[in-house]
Every structure is written in C-alpha cells, then in structure tokens.
Amino acid sequence: MRSKHGRHVPMWELIERTCRKDDPCNKNFSSFFGYLFERGDDTQFSEDQLIAIAQGMIDRPAKDTPDLPTPIGFAIFGQFIDHDITLDVITKLGEAFNDVEQLENIRTPRLELDSIYLAGKEASPFLYEKDSDKMIIGTSDNLLDVQRNREGTAIIGDHRNDENLFISQMQSLFIRFHNWVVDRGHNFEEAQEFVRHTYQQIIVEEFLPEIISDDVLGPLMEGFENGKLPSEYINWSKVAHMPVEFSAAAYRFGHSHVRQNYQVNDSLSGNLFDFGGFEAVPIGKNVDWKFFFDLDGKSFLKCRPIDTKLASALFDLPFAEVGLKNLAKRNLVRGQLTFGLLSGEEVARRIGIKPLPKHHVIKKLGLKQTPLWFYILAEAERNGGKLGKVGGTIVGGTLLQLLLQDKNAYINKNPDFNPFDLIPKTKSIIAGVAKAVTDYPA
C-alpha cells in the first residue's frame, strides 16, 4: 500500500496510526515533521568537523557522582516521552533530507501514550486481554516483563522501548499502572484517561522543572496556564507540531544525563550496557524504582548535569552497526547534515538573545558557528547543568504546546486533575506511580 505521497507504507505503520479518519486529532495535529524556523546551510559543517566535535565530548572517566539533584529515572522518562511522540523511519544518517514537511512522523505528536496504547482495544487487540479492560503484561518467567513472542521479541507499541533494560521496565511500569487503575474499579476508558493525565502532569510539574532553568520555564508555564505560550519570537500556534529543531537537536540533551554505572536492584549493579536489550528480562533484573526515583529520600541515583560531555559508553553503542556506534557523531551528523539545522548562534538571535561565546571545542577547531545540539549542551553547561534559553525554549515550548492543542489533555479537559486522588501520596507523582505498582501484579 502507498501513502498519498507515493511512498510504500508497511502494514505495521498503518496499524500503529492512532489518528484514524474519524479521530478529531486529524484536524489539530500534523503527522509530519517541520521546522520552527527554516532549513539552514547544511554545508557549513563537514562530516570530519562534526566527528572532531564528537571526539571532544567523550567523558573519561565518566562522572559517577553528578552534581544535579535530579533522580536518574527522569533520564529514562525523557526517553520514554521521545518514543511516545516522534519516530522517523525514513531518513538515513548523513544523507540530506530537503523536504521535511513530507517526512512522516510514525508516532502521534500528542502526549497520549501512543507507545503504550497504540490505537486502542479495537485496532490493536494484541496488546489487550480478551474480554477485559486490562493490558497484557509479563511472560511465563517474569510477570514484571513486557509481553513477548516465542523469540523473545517484545509485543509493545514501540520497539525502541525494549532497547535497554531501563526503558523496557518503564514500559512495563506504565502498562501495570493502567491495570492497577482498572483494578480500582475503573473501566478501560476511565483508566486510560487517568494514566494519560497522570503522565502529562508528570511532564509539566516534574520533568520540565528538573531539566529547564526557572527563568526560562517560568514565562512558558505562565503562558501554558493561561492557554497561550509567549509568542514574541515564536508563534507556537502556527509552527510544526514536531519540529526537527526539537527532535534532532534540543531534545537530545538527555544523552548528557546518562550515567555510566547503575544500581538496578539490591542485588544487581553494573555499567550502562551490561544489562542487555531487545531480550526477555529475567526476574533478577527487575528494576527497583527506589534507585531511580525518590521513593525513600536516599536511595536514588542522580543524573549527570547537562553539559558537553557524554558517558564513554555512548561512544560504543552495542546495538548499532559498525560506523554508527558513536552517539555524539550520530546526533551531530543527523542535525546538521540530514536536516541542515540553523546553528546555535543563529537560533539564539532568532529568539532575541545574544549568542554565547564560542565553546573551547568549537574555538579549537576554528569553526565560525556551533551545531545546534552542541550549542544547547554548552548553554546548559554555563547554566548550572540545566537547559538555558535556547534549549529550554525549544524543549519546553514544544511539549507544552502539544498539550495546549490537545482538547483531551488534562490542561483542557480537567485542569484540576490530581493523580494523588488515587495513587499513594509521595514526594512526586512519578514516585507515587512507581510505589503504586511495585511488585504488581506479582
């Protein structure tokens, strides 16, 4: 089958679409990428220059005692958000893609847990228990794993949510959370809405304040609560719902959060990629969320600051092909050569601020401009490890605008929503979710 643009569309893509013909989201949400500004000059950086920048980002030795108070679980939650709202299966690393408006986003650009629910019980029955309002969870060997086929492949809404142990267990957490809500007397639609609204409120009230500096987030939040984001420099009501400045640069800040070493549970610890991925999770690898969120005030590991250094493990990705294992290189090449993003300096000018002085890595290479992703990390580095004006505006504005334009989001449908009406009262909403479903349904 072919799309209206003539591209062959695999059947799995058609099954995954949540915005069906009768879904009102079609009127409000584009399923294609776009620019916040416009395409820049994709010849201003050579691949060799981008590789040289990447080499200057290796953190040796990795910082195991980061100076942010942010629980490390928010780095995983950030990846979980990304997999909910954006998926590009067309572009190839290093090959320019000049018509971004024709690049389809396979995920829906709504913070609706598309990667959990897909198109719902009728269109995606393989995710749901028969004659039940619950979702299928677990294997015969581990009730806290996601469901899998006989080859161990995860049967979930987005295959990327099985690429490492932590994101796989986050997927399991939210599936079990849905079932937990059903077990408290709610039907499928009620449980789905409660889980979605809880997820959205975690993003607004906990995730964004953890990653964006107060002076940048404050005006965005004020606009969000009043129904219109500040539009002096960016008219948020008219920009693409999934801008590539967000997906290919700004939102990749989370790679800097990643630690080298992790405590999985009381008995298991190790390096980032010691725990496998795209495979069944044995009981001994079940994540104890007290090490990832603040459940007891003392056990959780912390995020590394957002800066221009990445944990060394990210320069040798075990699941990537030879030549594509360097995550920093992948991010830089994708942003600048594939999408031709404006430089960080130019984006700063576009949002009305003076560009930062050149980072020493950029100065050493004699470059006149800075790739947008690196600029955002350098900005955060000078800003105490949180996103500054450029990064915070793109990340915060994009996510908050997605909620404002969704009539089913809590801010529009139920602005007084309080997840603590049901979940255990803890220091944070995400900790309450984790506490609610600990050992559930084991």
Image: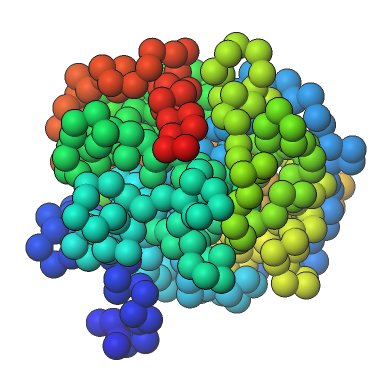
Front-most of residues 382 and 414? 414
Residue 318 higher or lower than 251, as above or below: below
Seen at 72% across and 72% down, the residue is 321
Front-most of residues 255 and 46? 255
Seen at 77% across and 36% down, the residue is 269
Judged from this view, the residue extending furthest toward the right is: 61
Label count reads 0
**Quarter of image, res 348:** top right
Q: Position of residue 270 (x, y in %)?
A: 79, 40
Is residue 245 in sight in this rendering? no
Judged from this view, the residue extending furthest toward the left is: 22
Q: Position of residue 418 (x, y in %)?
A: 26, 19
Front-most of residues 101 and 407? 407
Q: Position of residue 408 (x, y in %)?
A: 18, 40
Residue 3 higher or lower than 158, as above or below: below
Q: Position of residue 434 (x, y in %)?
A: 47, 28
Scheme by which the image is coloured: rainbow
The quadrant the N terminus occupies is: bottom left
Seen at 32% across and 40% down, the residue is 179
Seen at 22% across and 47% down, the residue is 133
**Quarter of image, res 76:** top right
Residue 222 higher or lower than 7, as above or below: above
Is residue 106 in sight in this rendering? yes
